[in-house]
Amino acid sequence: MRVAVAQMVCEVGNVAANCGTMQRLAEQAAGAGCDAVVFPEMADTGYEMKTIVAKASTWESGPLPLLQETATRLRIWMVCGLAEREGSDVYNSVAVLDPSGKLAARYRKAHLFTLAREPRFLKPGQSLTLAAIEGLQWGIMLCYDIRFPEMARSLALRGAEVVVVPAAWPAARANHWSTLLAGRAIENQLYMIGANRAGSDGSLQFAGGSRVVDPYGVLLAAAPEAGEQLLIAELQKSRVDEVRASMPVFQDRRPDLY
């Protein structure tokens, strides 16, 4: 399958403008023959906690219906990092929309980032999420989640062949971003897709550097640190099967020890 990774520059709190950017990038991805397009974390609101709480919306209101219409019109999968409201609770979420506009899967960030005060404003998710997209099993993580190898391994053991990571990763730790994505790909023998923010929200500068890493750790596509970028890469189930057959890591595990 052919996937586009949208590295975005967002306007904090301007949901309409950010959704317009997402629509424009989705149109570019569809025009390039892509089956799916992936957007960063909190692509609708920007990454500022009080703004997220103020602007978060339910799946029945806000940006989701607009993005569903876009997916339907373009006949493309869309993986979107959004601020989700349910009653009085707000979640850092990912919506997976299929080419008919259906909400095919939803993930709520499991590991909240204490340094960014996420636990003060957001509720954590309570489950892992997999989605079948164009013949491949996709696991979903969000930003800080990639620091927890147990989560990526759990997704792989449940059948993930791709793990997608929408993020708002800071420039101060850019080397961690690239290293962790490569590490998760190599140890789990799957594709890692990192869709990161560019630009800044106030004093917070983002790392950019969105990328796709194959199951052997080969870098297939990478964006620069600054600016909007649409990356395109080809994912093949046969590549996952080939790497896993050539080095039987899962067969050689010792879960009796750990």
Image (spheres, grey):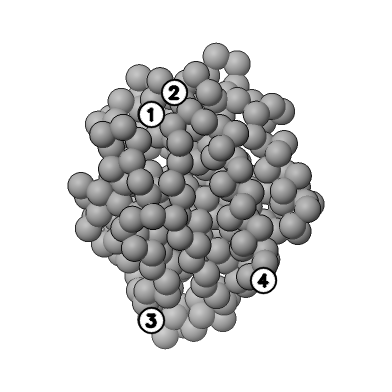
Quarter in which the C terminus is drawn: bottom left
Q: Position of residue 67 (x, y in %)?
A: 68, 43
Of pointers 2 and 4, the one earlier in the residue sequence = 4
For residue 145, say whether it is visible. Answer: no
Give me the residue at 28% from left, 37% from top: 204
**Residue neighbourhood size for the residue with mark 3, other residues' Cα within 10 Å, grouped as few (<14), some (14–19), many (≥20):** few
Instruction: Select label 2 or label 3 by which is in front.
Output: 2
Task: Check contact, mark 2 vs mark 1: CB within 8 A.
Answer: yes
Of pointers 2 and 3, the one earlier in the residue sequence = 2
Q: Which residue is mark 2?
A: 51
48 in relation to 151, above or below: above
The Cα–Cα distance between marks 1 and 4, rounded to whole angstroms, is 34 Å
73 in relation to 230, above or below: above
Q: Position of residue 110 (x, y in %)?
A: 43, 37
Q: Which residue is mark 3?
A: 247
Quarter in which the N terminus is drawn: bottom right
As shown in the figure, which amino acid type bears the numbered disc 1? Glu
**Foreground residue, 217 or 64?**
64
As shown in the figure, which amino acid type bears the numbered disc 4? Gly
